[in-house]
Image (cartoon, rainbow, N blue to C red):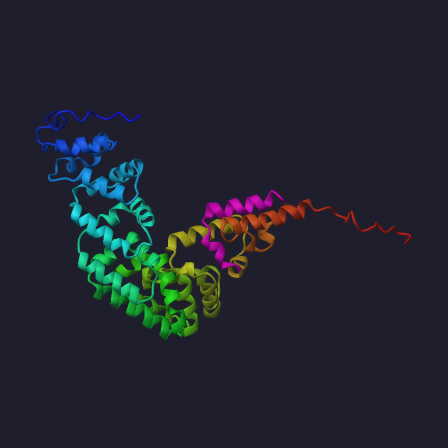
Amino acid sequence: MRLLRPPSASASTLTSPDKRLENQHTVDSLYKLSVDIRKLRKFKGWILSESPAYASETAELLRDMGADTTVITRILETHPEAVLCRPEDVAAQRDLWMSVCPNKHELMRIIEKFPSSFFTLTHHSNQRANISYFQSLRLSRSTIGKLMASAPQSFCRPVEQNQEVIHTLRETYLDLGGDEVDLCLWLKKLLSQNPYILLRPAEAWRDSLGFLREQGFTTEELLSLVSSLRASIAELRPEAMQLALAFIESALACSMDELKRIVIRCPAILYYSLPILVGRFQGLMDVGVSTEQVKECPNVLELTTQMALYRIHKLASYGYDVCSGSLDVIVGTKTDFEMSYCKVELRQKRPLFSHVAPLISAED
C-alpha cells in the first residue's frame, strides 16, 4: 500500500517558508484519486500550488472516455500538469483527437501512453489545419493519430511549415524515379519510422542527397538509399558521412565502386559515428574476422561488438568457425540469428549415415 499524507494535512505544514502554499483542494482531490502526493510534491510540487486546478473535472473527463480509476491515477502521476487544463479545453481536445481515432477506447490507449501529447492544448487552429492537410495526403486516421501522439510539436506549428517539408520529400522521391502511385505508401512508412522528420528543415534532405550525388551515386542508387534509410537520411550530416565513407574505404581497401556497393547493401554505415564504426570493425578483427569477410557482408557492422562476439562464440560452441566461413549466419535480427543457430545445431547433431538407406559393404 502507498503511504500517502492524509488530505487533512495542513498546507502550511507541508511547505517551507520560502515556497508557495499548496492548493488544499487540489491535494484533497488527487488524494481521493489515489495519486502519490509525496512523489508529486517531490518532483513537481509547483503544480500543487497552482490555482485554479481541475483534478476532479479532468478525472471525470477521462472516466467518460473509458478510463478506470487505475488508469486515471497513472495518467495524473505521469503528467500531473493535466489538472491545470480547463475542462472546456480538454473537451475540445478530445473532440479534435476523435476525428483521427476510430473510437474512445483507442483514444484512451493513446492518452495513457502519451499523456503529454494529448494535454498539449495550445494552437488548436494549427492542429486542426494540420490534420486536414495530412488527411488530404491520403494518410489513414491511425497514421495521423500516431503522428499527433509521437510528435505533437509538428501539429502545433503552422501548416505551411509541414507542407514545405512534405513538398521536399515528394519532389525528392519523384525526382529519383519513384512512382506517384507508391508515394503515399512511402510517406506513410517514412513518417511512421520517424515522426520527428517533420521538424527537420527541408534543407537537411537537400544537403544529404547533394553530398551523396557528389560521391557518384546514381539516381537509382539514391532512390534505393532513400527508401532504405527513409527518415534517417534527414538526420545525416555531410561531414559525418564523409568520415564514415573514408574509414570504410581505407579499412576495407576497396575501390569507389566497391564502396558504393557496400553502402547500398548496408546504408546504416552512413549514420554511424566514426568511433562506433572503428570500434565495431576492430572488435571483429580482434577475433580473427578478415576484411574480405566484412567486405562481403558489411551488414555485420550493424551489430554491436558485444552482440557480434556473443553470436560468434555461440556458433563456435557447436563447432562452427565463423572466421573461416560466412558472416551471413550472425547478421540480422535476434530471430534471424536463432534460425541460423538452429540450423547449425541440427547439422552438428545429424548422424553420419542415414538410418533409412541400407549400408553397402565393401564386397558389394
- Residue 256 placed where, x, y %? 45, 69
Residue visible at 22% across and 40% down in the picture: 60
**Residue 311 belongs to the span the image colors magenta:** yes
Q: Identify the magenta region.
A: 297-318
- Compared to residue 170, the image places residue 314 above or below, namely above
Residue 320 in view, yes or no: no
Relative to 337, 8 lies left or right:
left
Closer-to-camera residue (51/261)? 51
Residue visible at 87% across and 50% down in the picture: 361
Which quarter of the figure is the C terminus placed in?
bottom right
- Residue 110 placed where, x, y %? 31, 48
Residue visible at 40% across and 69% down in the picture: 182
- Compared to residue 11, the image places residue 251 above or below, namely below
Residue 179 in view, yes or no: yes
Q: Residue furthest right?
A: 363
Residue visible at 41% across and 65% down in the picture: 227
Relative to 225, 114 lies left or right:
left
Which quarter of the figure is the N terminus placed in?
top left
**Residue 227 belongs to the span the image colors magenta:** no
- Residue 43 placed where, x, y %? 21, 35
- Residue 38 placed where, x, y %? 22, 29
Q: Residue furthest left?
A: 17
Residue 56 lies in what quarter of the image? top left
